[in-house]
Amino acid sequence: MLKIEAVLQPSKLDAVKDALLEAGIEGMTILEARGHGRQKGHTEFYRGREYTVDLLPKIKIELVVTDDQKEKALQAIIGAARTGRIGDGKIFISGVDDAIRIRNDERGEAAI
Amino acid sequence: MHCGMKLSFLSAILGIPSLALAQPAAQDTQAQIAALQQAVKSAQAASASAQSAGDNAWMLTSAALVLLMTGPGLALFYGGLVRKKNVLGTMMQSFAMMGLVTIIWAVAGYSLAFGPGNLFIGDFQHLFLRGVGLAPNPAYAPTIPEQTFMIYQLMFAIITPALITGAFAERMKFSAMALFLSLWSLIVYCPMAHMVWGVGGLLNASGGHIPSLDFAGGTVVHITSGVSALVTCIYLGKRAGYPYTKMQPHSMVISFIGACLLWVGWFGFNAGSALGSSSLATSAFVNTHFAAAAAAVGWSIAEWIRNGKPTALGAISGAVAGLVAITPASGFVQPMSALAIGFLAGFFCFFMVFIVKGFFGYDDSLDAFGVHGAGGTLGALLTGLFAASVINPVFKDAAGNPLPSGAIDGHWSQMLNQLAGVAISWSISIVGTLALLFVVDKFVGLRLSPEQEAEGLDLSQHNEEGYDLNS
């Protein structure tokens, strides 16, 4: 089992969610985050004082998928989120030791 | 000539038979005259009663409008400009004034401000509002109950110390603030109000030694609060991390709503100072609106030129600056003068906030001095320039004929009187505020500890949070 963490532009959330559902992946966790990679922020002005805002709003999607689903999931995310510009985001993949369904104690891939 | 001859000929002809009926006709005419006199008297009484009813309705409405300026107007305006962790604490400072100043005013404040006393302060004859009933006090407002006048003036006494809170935002203890501002209202506000508006006051426009024109409180409210704000923010010192740490407004939306409530409420502040629903109230109403609009445009233009974009904060700050500057002038100047005063205030206060504040480096957190102190000073001086007797014949000669009001009428020496009023309000503010800050600091301690300041007013002073949107 693998964990996929994708940091995305907030405006791409709906497209990515729909693409994942279409690819047959239903379970996901969405978090509101702030951050930046190479993107510059912007400046705001209040009564003559300049403030640089470089922590930009982001959306983070976390999915746990089986090894077979991994490529489908990645294609769905990248296809929906890519614009070609700086700020598109990043995806990180890590291993998952176990997964448990709270409702009925199912474990492993059956729990995903 | 032709007419006149015909008329006298006619009355001569008609007069002859009436002489024959002189005796009984005279009695009828007497009765008719008496009835007519009675009718005129009732009509006059009805008219006076209607005028009184109109005046009282407008004055009670104005009092409500001025209170609205503090709560929630100023509370929202200031609340949105501070960081989220301080929003409730900031709003509580305005609300505390609504509670505390009311009690102080009812017990002693009204008496000290408007009781006849001496040149500088009233007396205690109206302690606990003794003698202040529903009959009018002809010295102040002959057509409304004195309690209407009292409650209207109370709303001014409430908002004035509330304005000062803008200077020491995010760093003063609630207990110290409550004590400091309560005492301030007694030793700075009441004497100033008495000098400018009280019977026998030194600066009273009608009969004072130095007649100073201040229609709704440019000196009494804005200069005192603005200058006291400057003194306080310098005494207290800057916020931790100022000016390098990010300290931007947490909600421009809330500040925007507050500023609009201030604009609307100001109609009560200025037009209500006519103390009746008269054409003078109309003048003040129109002037107030014109100045606010012109100043918002003026500040926005200045900001657009200097920073490349007009901001919402700039526009609303500009409007407030215009409202401050027109306050002393509102019942004395013509509408076009109000536009000019507004424009000048927009540019001048922009300069004070953007350039002067940065140059000197004081942390006047919400620009109480830059807008109220500076705007009030400018407005008081421009009042001397633009006051026109055609709008308000405030100066009269022995026969009751109107005399020139301001420089625009040719009365240039009025500028000196205005300067005197400005100087006195600056002085009493500086001296009174310094004395109080020193005393309160000794007994209670003014400033939050560094830990409390980091935690924020809401949690450290009130054990509350302004927003808990995830609950």
Image (tube, coloured by chain):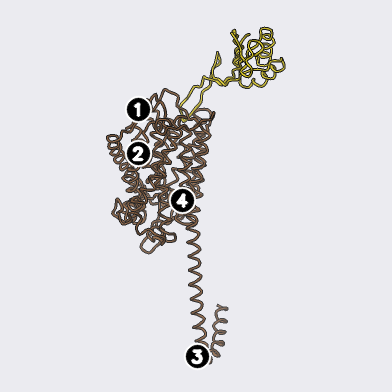
Which residue in the protein does label 4 denote?
A: B63
Amino acid type indicated by mark 4: Ala
The CA span between labels 4 and 1 is 38 Å
Of marks 2 and 1, which one's residue comes earlier in the chain? 2
- Mark 1: which amino acid? Ser
Q: Specify the subunit that label 2 lies on.
A: B
| Among numbered discs 2 and 4, the one appearing first in the sequence | 4
Quarter-wise, where is residue A78 in the image? top right
Whole-angstrom CA distance, mark 2 to mark 1, is 23 Å
Q: Which residue is mark 2?
A: B228
Circles 4 and 3: CB atoms closer than 8 Å: no
Residue B18: x and y, percent? 54, 89
Chain coloured brown: B
Residue type, numbered disc 3: Gln
Label 2 to label 4, Cα distance in Å? 25 Å
In x, y percent, where is residue B446? 33, 33
The residue under label 1 is B449
